[in-house]
Amino acid sequence: MPWTLADSPLGPHVLELGPGQGLTTELLRPHFSHMTTLEVDPKLVESLHSRFQNSNVTVVRGDATAIPLEDAQFSGVVSLHMLHHVHSSELQDKVFREALRVLKPGAVFVGVDSVGMDKLRMRLIHIGDTLVPVNPDTLGGRLERAGFKNVSVDVNPYAFRFRAQRPV
């Protein structure tokens, strides 16, 4: 996570897309005044509500392709190993447009996801689950087409990270 968030001022109110069981939420929340998590799975939402009640985290049930929140309200949006769980590249592009919509002008969208998803180990981990790899070579253009500026994508042997800014 430090590699993903490096040089990315996210501000005081961050939206985390697809927190799953909340492991990353637990690590992120001490760094922000307020966090909102958006999770589609109702059982995970229930668990997240219990886990983060009376904290600085608000849990919202919803789909990242149609975020049920108002425009321009977040100082940052974070996606940590969730994009490959979105059912198609077209729906991933909707996630990008929705992230842009809910960000305040000048705010950033940052994230990380795995590379090498065609490897057998990744396929086995995702049996019964969605696995739609994101190509880091085309991600920058996709984010720009969604409306982001100042896009960067960095790749290491295990993952890629991205940073994109909503225009001011």
Image: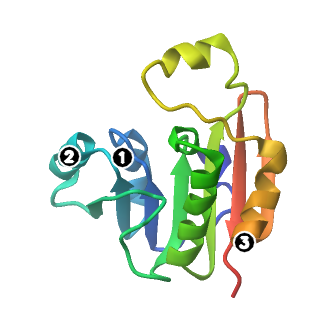
Give coordinates of residue 138: x percent, y percent: 82, 49
On residue 26, the disc is: 1
Q: Relative to 21, is 124 above or below?
A: above
Give coordinates of residue 159: x percent, y percent: 70, 35
Disc 3: CA contacts within 10 A as few (<14), some (14-19) or many (>=20): many
Q: Relative to 104, is 136 above or below?
A: above
Quadrant of the snapshot with the C terminus: bottom right
Residue type marked 1: Glu
Q: Please, what secondary structure does the residue beneath circle 3 have?
A: loop
Identify the colour scheme used. Answer: rainbow
Q: Which residue: 71% across, 53% down?
A: 162
Give coordinates of residue 166: x percent, y percent: 66, 77
Q: CA distance from mark 3 to mark 2?
A: 33 Å
Residue type marked 3: Phe
Given contact means CB atoms under 8 Å apart, are the residues at marks 1 and 3 in contact? no
Label 3, on which residue? 148
Give coordinates of residue 7: x percent, y percent: 70, 61
Q: Relative to 89, is 143 above or below?
A: below
Answer with the quarter of the image where residue 105 lies.
bottom right
Would you say residue 7 is visible in this rendering? no
Given contact means CB atoms under 8 Å apart, are the residues at marks 3 and 2 in contact? no
Which numbered disc, 1 or 2, marks the residue that appears first in the sequence?
1
Disc 1: CA contacts within 10 A as few (<14), some (14-19) or many (>=20): few
Given contact means CB atoms under 8 Å apart, are the residues at marks 1 and 2 in contact? yes
Q: CA distance from mark 1 to mark 3?
A: 28 Å
Q: CA distance from mark 1 to mark 2?
A: 9 Å
Q: Which residue: 16% across, 60% down?
A: 54
Would you say residue 77 is visible in this rendering? yes
Quadrant of the snapshot with the N terminus: top right
Q: Please, what secondary structure does the residue beneath circle 2 have?
A: helix
Label 2, on which residue? 51
